[in-house]
Amino acid sequence: MASEPATAPIEYRTREGFLDEVFAGAGGAAAPHAAQLVAALGQMGPEHLAAAGRRRDAIFMQQGITFELTGEDGPKDRPFPLDLVPRIIPADEWIPIKRGLAQRIRALNAFVDDVYHAREIVRAGVVPWRLVVSRSHFARVVHGIRPPGGVYTHVAGCDLVRDADGTWRVLEDNVRTPSGISYVLENRVAMTRLVPELFAQYRVRPVDHYPQLLLAALRAVAPSADAEATVVVWTPGPFNSAYFEHAFLARQMGVELVEASDLVVRDDVLYMRTTDGLERVHAVYRRIDDDYVDPLEFRVDSVLGVPGLVRAYRAGTVAVANAFGTGVADDKAIYHYVPDMIRFYLNEEPILANVKTYLLTDPDQLEHVLGRLDELVVKPTGESGGKGVFIGPATPPDDLAGLADVIRAYPDRWIAQELVNLSTVPTAGNDGRLAPRHVDLRPFAVFGEDIKIVPGGLTRVALIEDSMIVNSSRGGGSKDTWVLEDGQDTDRAEPEGMLTAPPTMPDLRYAGPWVGQQQQQQQ
Amino acid sequence: MLARIAHELFWLGRNLARAEHTARMLDGVFQASLQGRPDDPAGVTLDWSSMLAIMGAPPGEGPVRRDEVLRALTLEPDNPTSVVACIGRAREGARTVRDVISAEMWEAVNTTNMRMTESHPPDLSARPSSLYSYVKERCALFWGLTSRTMLRDEASAFLAAGGRIESADMVLRMLRVALPPGIPEPSSTAERGQALALLQAVGGFQAYRRAVPAPPNALPVAHFLVFERTYPDSVAASVDAVHNALFRADGNPRNSEPVLRLQRLSADLEFRGRAEADGGDLHATCEAVQEELVRVDRDIADRYFAGAVGTMVAV
């Protein structure tokens, strides 16, 4: 089995100047951990892969795993684009990613706490206060509030990318309401049903315990004496583009999915309206932005909010995940300082590197960036989901000139980054043939009593040739991400029968012969 | 009604319930076997050798191979425990009682049997899930048609009694094999270890999630599968259903041994469920309930089927 041909039996051309994670060897040979996947794909052939793709679309439509794509003829439900070729991360590569993420999230959490309390990092001169307060997600109303356990960033999803030399780098932090975990779980279920043969030679670490981790974390921070604290998932409603995920998480955790109209605050305590009257809520996993949560404290025009929620939160009667005001930590201008935060709060060297970032408020850096706009990526600081991003080489010169004027006028609202040559992974087209497509990775971390990270995460893939934009709203798809167990166990036979002998049980029964009984009756 | 017909209906129900449970368990084990171990310690053992033990096969020599178990327990017509053999017997039974059950029910079973015995069986080792979901869907269709189209008479009562007694037995078998020996000891890994596999093997994950706040560890899951009456596939719910069906069918239920026995078992489960909320010997409970169900089976045969007791077939 290990002596499968290392060269691809499949037609495949890697993209020059980029790392291909599967055909990474010299002359396009498969990397050791991927050789068996390549062999299995070769055995399947393009026709089978294409047929499995059609079954996938049918199943996703049936199960309602779709997203809305606004095309020329209005919004339309499309099956969520899952590419059937998995992305493999060997165990030894995953360990530093996992440690690096835990370290980073711990530092981001410490930063949120610091910003709303002592501001030590500001006083030490590491992060300028002017920059912190000017962030759009800085929330003055939560100053001085410390949630249970001092945890703010209960759910975090940092976007990682791989450079041409194979280095993993953090591209963005998401510590408000990162989405995508439902696709991680659904992708895995779909893969085991559609292409189980690809799993044959691998021991892939499962991901389906995520809802348990999340529920345990929410219960751990809930201000309730008994272990059965009431937890809810708060959704803006069925029209939200991530409603599928909200419903998925509520169902998997076995908790209520609530909207604002279900919630009410009385005497600084949060309740939900049930058929049995008001029921106390101890913890809220909210999937709605700070701006809309409470019209008394944030945006007064919000109809999605619950009046008095921040008051209840301040009184400590309810835990909210993620905490209000965490957006200050995943701002793109703050991103630049995260390695310094790790050194400052944890006294450690960062395990995962940043992408080289230029702060445009610094006149020298601004001049440098303006001279290289056609090579760099320019991003607005307060946005997420790839909105308003300019990729230098792909932007027409006229637009770049306009961009330069905007940047000069509002240098604090933009940052510039070096372009990362995202790695590629073989991806199946509609005809089942493989071609390199660029990918990123969003692992999901849950911070309750400690930080737990689900092996792998959501690999997003740009389905358009040579494109590096992976957002699903802009033609991106996803891949099942396999983190392998330590040591490959390629023999599928179970090692040594059962450890203990099975209990003696009454045998299975079958219908007795009726004829015999008839004779018995005739005696 | 005729004892012979009641007997056929009872076994029609048993065979279909067995086919469905076997399919669900095989599917659960197959899905779990594709992936590695979870981060948390596993509290239960549900693998291919467990499948063989549940279905009563003698422990063989040497390692257990996935593809062999899959084939033997799914499409092997000569193995009486295989899904296809259960469906085949159900079809023969349904043919005998065609006049009693509705035409739609008969058609549902017959079509299922035809599909399962087609000359080009699906590629099991590669993609068994579609076959198992077919079996699950067809069984659901049969029971749905039963509640929609069949007269609620004695006949339907014996059909239901057979289906539910088999469900209880299959769940007990799975628990007895899969639960680790150390389960009553508090804070053992067995208790903390997760037991998702058990819930997935009966399709009860979401029901558990809604009913029980505790994480799906071995002890609460086993407790749920045995005692939780609001969950339709729990042992307690199945025992109640068998009782209700026989109570309905029996001319003089207050004087009926199987009915009385089921009443006592049902109350016993309620008491044990309360007493064992924080532990208790689940293994002993499962064993006791299983043995009591064997006695119920014999009582049913004596009272209604003119003594036609189920037999055992060597696997």
Image (tube, helix red, strand yellow):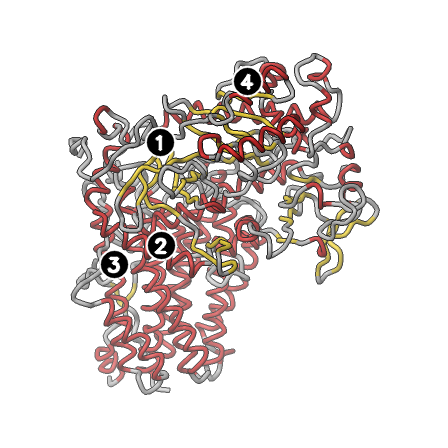
Of circles 4 and 2, the one toward us is: 4
- In space, the residues marked 1 and 3 are separated at their CA atoms by 30 Å
Task: Tell me the CA gap for discs 1 and 2.
Answer: 27 Å
Q: Residue at x 18, y 43 (%)?
A: B61
Residue that badge 1 annotates: A485
Where residue A73 appears, as percent x and y from the top left, is 49, 61
Please name the residue that numbered disc 3 is placed on.
B74
Q: Nearer the viewer, residue A497 or B184?
A: A497
Q: How many C-alpha atoms fall within 10 Å of the one at disc 3: few (<14), some, or many (≥20)?
A: many
- Chain letter behind tag 3: B
Q: What number is the disc on residue A56?
A: 2
Q: CA distance from mark 4 to mark 3?
A: 68 Å
Mark 1 or 3: in front is: 1
- The residue that appears at 16% across and 33% down in the rendered structure is A5
Q: Chain of mark 1?
A: A
Task: Look at discs 4 and 3 and give the one toward the viewer.
Answer: 4
Mark 1 and mark 4 residues within 8 Å of each other at the beta carbon: no
Task: Determine whether, in the image, residue A366 is placed left or right of residue A491.
Answer: right
Q: Nearer the viewer, residue A48 or A415?
A: A415
Residue reaching furthest to the right = A267
Front residue of A203 and A141: A141
Kind of element beneath mark 4:
helix
- Between disc 2 and disc 3, the foreground one is 2
